[in-house]
Amino acid sequence: MDEPNTNWALLRELKVEYQKDDKKLVDLGSCGLHILHGAFKDGVKSTKWDVDKFLRAIYNLYKDVPARRALYTQYTGSSVFPLKFCSHRWLENVEVAQRAINVVQHMRKFVESVKKDKVEPSSNSFKEVVASLADPLLCAKLAFFKSVAVEVEPFLKEFQTDDPMVPFLYATLCQTLRNIMECFMKFDQLKNITKVTADDVKDSKHYLSLNDIVLGLDTKKALRTIGDTVKSKDLLQFRTECRQMLVSIICKMLTRSPLSYPMTKAASCFDPAMICADPNLAKRRAEKVLSILTDAGRLTGPLADRALKQFRCIIADKTIFDQSDRTDNRVDHFWIRILEKNNDELSTVIKMVSCLSHGNANVERGFSINAECLFENMHDESLEARRQVYDAVCYEGGIEQVSVTKELIHSVRNARARIMEYKERCKKESTDAEREKMLERQRTVEVEFSEKKRKQILSDASKEAASLEKQINQLKK
C-alpha cells in the first residue's frame, strides 16, 4: 500500500464488495512500515523543533554551489558536507542527523566567517541555518531525534522482506513499543503492555518525572557539552518536548498500526519462539485465528475444529520448534516441512495466514536500496543501472549464482565502446541543445528589435499625425 487515503478508500470498497458474497475481508490495515514512518514523523512534528527544516537547509545551502563549498572548506578546513534529508523517509535519516551533529561546529564557524567578511549568502537556506544555530539545544535535539530513530529502525529493516512475517509482527511491534515506553512511563504500566491504550499513554500520572526520562547517551553528552549556558527552565521544557515526541509516536502506533487488529495478535500462534515460551497461550491464539477466519466465511466450522486439533497435536512436541531459526528459514516453509500428510486443514490455515500482508515491503525496501545506491551528484541513469544490476543479482540468488555467459562476457568487452557511444550521444544532444538555445536567443533578439522598431514607427507616426492635425486646425482659423 502507498498513499494512505487512497488505500483506505479502496479497502472500504473492497469490503463492501466481499459482503455481497457473505464474506468478510481479513486484513491487518494499512502498511505497517508506512504507519511507523508516519508515527515517527508526527512525533518529531509535535515538538515544534523544525529539525527537518534545519537538515534540509544545511544541505541545500551547499547544493550545486561550488563557490560556497569552497568557502566552507576554506573557513573550516573540512571537506565533510551535510547529507541530503529525505522528507518522506524520516526513519532513514539517522546518518543525516549524525552528519549534521558532526558539522554543527563547522557551520557556526562558516556563518561567523562569512558575516565577518560580509559575503554571507542571501538565500532562505542560510537564514534558516542562522536561526537554527542560535538555539543552544540544537545538538541535543538532533541527538534525541537520532536515538529514537535508531530504536525503531530495526523493525523496518527486518520487515522489508517479501517473506511471510505476520506471525512475528505482534511480538516485534510490542517490543518496539516497550523500548520506547520505558523511556518515559513507569514500570507498573509496562507489566502488561498488551493492555496499554492510547488514553493510558496520554495520562500524565503514568509518566516518570522529567529528570528521570531516558534521553539516550548521545543526548546526555550534548547536554553536558552545553553546560550552564541553558537555563533550568529551558532544560525542563526540552525534556517535556522529548516526552511529547515519544507519546505521539506511541499513540499513533497503538491506533493505526496492525496492533489494533485482532488477527495480528492471534497470528503470533505460528511463531515457533512463542510456542516454545507458552504452548497454552499459543493454543488460545490459534483458536482465535480460526474463529476470525470462520466468522469471515473463509473456513467452515468442522474444518476449523480439525485444524485446531492438528495444531494441538503438532505443538505437543516442543523440541521441533527449538530448531527453528527465523533468520535462515521462512516460517511457512518451516511449518509445511513439519506437517504430516494428514494435516491438510492446518496447512490450509497456515497458507491463509502467510498470504496476509505485513506491509508493502517491496516498495519500502526499494527506497532503502536506493538510499544505499545514491551518492552526491549522481545521474538518474547511473542509479537506474545500479538498481538493474542489484535486481539481476537478487533474481539469480546471489553474486555466486550469477551465470557468466558469452553474452555477459561480450557485453563487458563492449563496455568501453558503449561508454564512448554514450558520450558522443550526450555531446551531440548537448550541441543540439546549445544550437537550439542560440537560435532561441537570436529569435528573442529579433523579436525585441522588431518590437522596438514597431514602437518607434508608431511614435513617429503619432508625432506626424499630431503635427498634421495642428496644421489643419491653424488653416481652419
Image: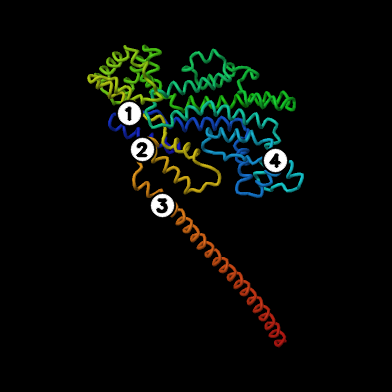
Q: Is residue 353 above or below residue 54?
A: above
Q: Nearer the viewer, mark 4 or mark 1?
A: 4
Residue shown at 44% from the left, 46% from the top: 385
Sequence-first disc among 2 and 4:
4
Res 444 quadrant in image: bottom right
Q: Is residue 411 above or below residue 328?
A: below
Work out whether residue 259 or residue 17 is closer to the camera in this orientation and state it.
259
Kind of residue at disc 2? Glu
Percent position (x, y) of residue 454?
61, 74
Q: Nearer the viewer, mark 1 or mark 3?
A: 3
Work out whether residue 399 or residue 228 is closer to the camera in this orientation and state it.
399
On screen, residue 365 versus residue 454, left or right, reads left
Q: Do the residues under discs 2 and 3 have CB atoms within 8 angstroms? A: no
- Residue carrying label 4: 76
Sequence-first disc among 1 and 2:
1
Marks 1 and 3 sit apart, C-alpha to C-alpha, by 57 Å
- Residue carrying label 1: 24
On screen, residue 180 versus residue 132, left or right, reads left
- Residue carrying label 2: 396
